[in-house]
Image (cartoon, grey):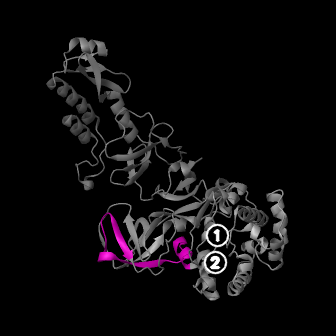
Amino acid sequence: MGAVVTAFNTAFRDYVAAGIPASGENDPAKSEIRAIGETIEQLLVTSGIQSIYETTSAGIAATTNGQLFIVAGSGDVFAYLYKNVAGVAVYQGVSLPSSASVEALQDALVEIQGVVGDVAVLKEAAGYPSIYPVPGWEKIELDADGRFSSGRKTDNTEWAAKNHAEAQLEERPWRFPFPIADWVSVTVDPNNKFEAGVDRWGIYWVGYRGEIVPVGNGGLILSACAYGDSTTYGDELTARNAERWTTLLGADLGIPIWNRGANGQSAAKIVARAGGYISTASVTGGSIPASGPVTLTDSSVPDMLSSYTYDGLWDVMTDDGTRIRGTLTRASGTAYTFTRLNAGSAKAAAIVDLIPITGRNDLAAHAFIGMGINDEPATGANTSLDDMKAHYRAITSACKGGFTVWGVLDRGAGEPTANMAFILALETWLRQEYGSAYCPVRPYLASARALADAALVAPGFTPTTDDTDAVAAGRTPPSFRFGGVHLNELGHQLQARFMSRFLRARSPNTGSPQASFLLMEGSGRIILEN
């Protein structure tokens, strides 16, 4: 079938002169498409297949064991190839497209619908002609009429419909970070480039220097992230994903909350992986390879991925500003492995900046921030109060979608005196610095109100003497905790309940992201509006 493949590759080649981009994008010519049929016909003759049979029975009757024969198809399929195997028709997995389906494919690629003035509702190309996928294309998206709207070629370039009348495609430098179905609204600028959009989580995005970047949530809490340590991660819970406070709070507010907690992490590590700090690292071998992994060492924030189990995207940036996107994983306590997403040219670099793209995108949603338990004096970290202030200011300054800080928890009556002094000093500063953006979770849990609420959350709950003694001393009751600082299931329920009440009083979760977006879209043209 090599001649048929060659004929298709010739008709649907990428450029006017094959392999030469400078010759311009090739619009398939119908004469070359019709020539495919002649190639197929010649192949049939040279293969000894003289007839096209109406049924497999007719084909079996006219052939002997081992011979190939063709049975007529219908619709988009011209014919099917079978083999006579001891009197049984065995389909060979080969079908020939009809001329109508080939021309329909050309129409879908060439007679494309422009985006100007249109609302395009995109869908996957299900049920498309049998020769789909199209050679040279990795993905194609169609509009409601089945015409080409956007796609990605096998060379990883993005394309969109430009002008229907002129039958042109246009390379699209703006890379959508999510599938198109995740967008509520998208606008393009006068050059048909991505200008602005809002995704289904209420995050606003703009096109900036060849990239789509998040800019915030318009003041609406329609999604959130939670950055912290084991007290955010939900350590010691039996069914952690279902029982931790982030899951319970999200369910109560009706929003997704992405939990980014990691056991044992200090504030500096949390801030670095969220994007509050841009850390640096040395590149082993002095070069980011064209493809594959490379080891990074000597990070300015050591081991910031310790106990961190979530996949994320990172950019490494060289001294000349070149950014390469990929994944970053923990190789050891002193090294990371960076693997670029797409192959490219090798890039010389001795030291690179580590830019957490996932963290940057997270902070476009509302952020819940609790950190410091692994910076207390008794842990040996001995982080100063001034350093803790710097860490909180660094991460909150990177929050584009608003934030709520809630501080740290305590270990009840067993909390060392030096730790408790650290906790109380930090809480005083958080209240002074952030005002209504500070949610006093620990003081609430250490209150008589929390004991009363526990009876509502868990009917039949009765506080013990140790519980009332702890509250009298301003400590978290043992009935809300495991043996140490981690909250048990009841403790997480109370934290979620209190934070929900706090948020509803401070910022009611109401409004439509689409309505807010349309008010601020400016002169851009809407090309997608769900």
Q: Earlier in the sequence, mark 2 or mark 1?
A: 1
In the displayed structure image, the side of residue 224 where residue 157 appears, left or right:
left
Q: Residues within 10 Å of mark 2 (few under 14, many from 20)?
A: many
Q: Look at the image and give the residue range highlighted in magenta.
A: 268-296
> Residue 477, percent across and down?
77, 71
Q: Report the residue marked by disc 1.
A: 231
Identify the disc placed on residue 373.
2
> Residue 235, percent across and down?
61, 66
Asked if the magenta segment contains residue 289, the reply would be: yes
Quadrant the N terminus occupies: top left
For residue 165, which quarter of the picture?
top left
Residue drawn 68% across the image and 64% down it = 219
Whether the residues at callouts 2 and 1 have beta carbons within 8 Å, the answer is yes
- Residue 431 seen in render: yes
The image shows residue 174, relative to residue 76, as above or below, that is below
- Kind of residue sitting beneath label 1: Thr
Q: Residues within 10 Å of mark 1 (few under 14, many from 20)?
A: many
For residue 175, which quarter of the picture?
bottom left
Residue drawn 34% across the image and 21% down it = 73
In the displayed structure image, the side of residue 328 where residue 293 appears, left or right:
left
Q: Residue 211 versus residue 341: which sits nearer the camera?
A: 341
Q: Residue 520 versus residue 229: which sits nearer the camera?
A: 229
> Residue 149, percent across and down?
45, 45
Q: Residue 334 versus residue 159: which sits nearer the camera?
A: 334
For residue 33, which quarter of the picture?
top left
Asked if the magenta segment contains residue 224, the reply would be: no
The image shows residue 445, relative to residue 204, as above or below, that is below
The image shows residue 324, relative to residue 297, as above or below, that is above
Q: Residue 82 versus residue 98: which sits nearer the camera?
A: 82
- Kind of residue sitting beneath label 2: Ile
Give the alpha-carbon distance from disc 2 to disc 1, as whole Å. 9 Å
Callout 2: helix, strand or loop?
A: helix
